[in-house]
Image (cartoon, coloured by chain):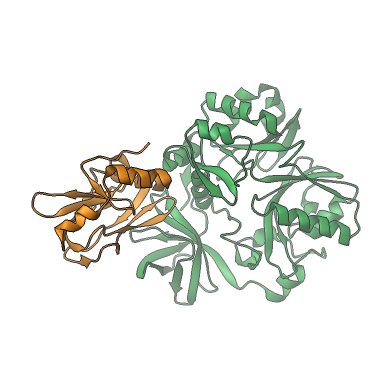
Amino acid sequence: MLKKTVLNAAHRALNARMVDFGGWDMPVNYGSQIEEHHAVRKDCGMFDVSHMCPVDVVGADCRPFLSRLVANDVAKLTVSGKALYAAMLNDAGGVIDDLIIYFLTNTRFRIVVNAGTADKDLAWMQAKVAEWKLDVTITQRRDGANNLGIIAVQGPNARARVWQVLPQAKAAIADLKPFFAAEVDQYFIASTGYTGEDGYEIMLPAGEAEAMWNALKDAGVAPCGLGARDTLRLEAGMNLYGQDMDETVSPLDAGLAWTVAMKDERDFVGKAALTANGQQKQFLGLILLDKGVLRGHQQVITKQGNGEITSGSFSPTLQQSIALARLPLGVAIGDEVEVDIRGKLLKAKVVKPVFARNGKAVI
Amino acid sequence: MSNVPSNLKYAASHEWVLKNADGTVTVGISDHAQEALGDLVFVELPEVGAHYDAEKEIAVVESVKAAADVYAPIAGTVTEVNQAAADAPESVNADAYAAWLFKMTPDNLADIDALLDAAAYQAVADAA
């Protein structure tokens, strides 16, 4: 039995193509996935991401808890509303999940974790609270009473469309810098996203999500499926948990070194393993020079040895195939490599793992 | 609801087959298949002159989402490919029955009779 978000009926009313997405019945596209992609790069689109799980962390020991729990350092969160992207590691330094932590007060933080990992994440967090004997209460907000829906509104016109629908929130959210959140009445509105475009992610009581979705649609926001979300995040060079990294992959080998605060004295789960193992692979981008489509798990042949594509697709912005890949150390940006696609070796160029953001190609 | 023309035969693997007057057959993917795949961005066609057994991988269509094999609906030799479909994969989305992929000379023309008719294929597509 697939789980449904509170917007399931709204997707079906729009004739969305629904798929089993990690146990959730989710829209992959409504019409053309490529048009949905362009809507976000050029105008404004919205995604139902209510399958993701908000987790409220409350108590006197929030900071010591989060400081040990994740590889990024919550000490960077000094202003209320500021958000931090972080990886939660296991003792071997593998990634249990990647998540966003929002700082509200010193006794109240909100974390948003991935859909498919939410159950194990919650169990891990609860176990750590007990093990470290801390005054912290962990409460998931996806299921049951007081659950939240999440709508991501993304694109150059996203802010203006949200102000139109939520005029009472405009004063609080108009000047939010990237990666901040504001609470306005029952709404939690964050300037975060997974597309490489400006916009908001709106958390709200689940019972109000469908009315909000319809109001945004009436304001001209294009409903977009998880298919476009995937090509948008791929172009933006953003990792997808389960493809680009998982519990067997170090964040240092998944392009997430920038989220790992190693330099100070602070200890966190997985730090010893990261220190001992160091970086073993490079996480880089590929652009296919021949015709075809790069896909996850294809082998990459380089002068320094073989690597593997972790995510690949067709880039609607670049009009050619792109990928994220884990490659041997020593491979350099600008190198030409080969990719094994169904037994044929096709040429690809190694690039920085960011392809398009803010409406434009950056390659 | 996808379009299933009644003048064509179909394979359960979602290819359509048109019997031509010259003894060849024209093959493409069904409207249901293009709709399920979504926006096509790459088409890999077979080599003219190559022989394929029935149900062997003969071509590849890739959408933004996924790659899908196209299978030879019957045994035969490829006589012609539609380069225009490879040059503009979106033409298959626009009209899957106009944007054919290849033509072949069947080993046994009678093999066509064993393929699905429109009603039988519609049932397959509805169950997918």
Q: Position of A128 compared to A270: left or right?
A: right
Residue drawn at x 78%, y 48% is A77
Residue drawn at x 75%, y 58% is A70
Residue B24 appearing in the image: yes
**In the depicted structure, whether residue A97 falls above or below residue A220:** below
**In the depicted structure, whether residue A245 falls above or below residue A228:** below
Q: Position of residue B96 (x, y in %)?
A: 28, 44
Q: Position of residue A181 (x, y in %)?
A: 72, 38
Q: Which hue belongs to chain A?
A: green
Q: Which chain is orange?
A: B
Q: Choose top left, top right, bottom left or bottom right for residue A254.
A: bottom right
Pick whichever, A304 or B53, lies toward us.
Answer: B53
Residue drawn at x 87%, y 50% is A136
**In the depicted structure, whether residue A224 falls above or below residue A2:** above
Q: Position of residue A246 (x, y in %)?
A: 63, 63
Pick whichever, A193 or A24, lies toward us.
Answer: A24
Q: Position of residue A316 (x, y in %)?
A: 42, 46
Residue drawn at x 43%, y 37% is A31
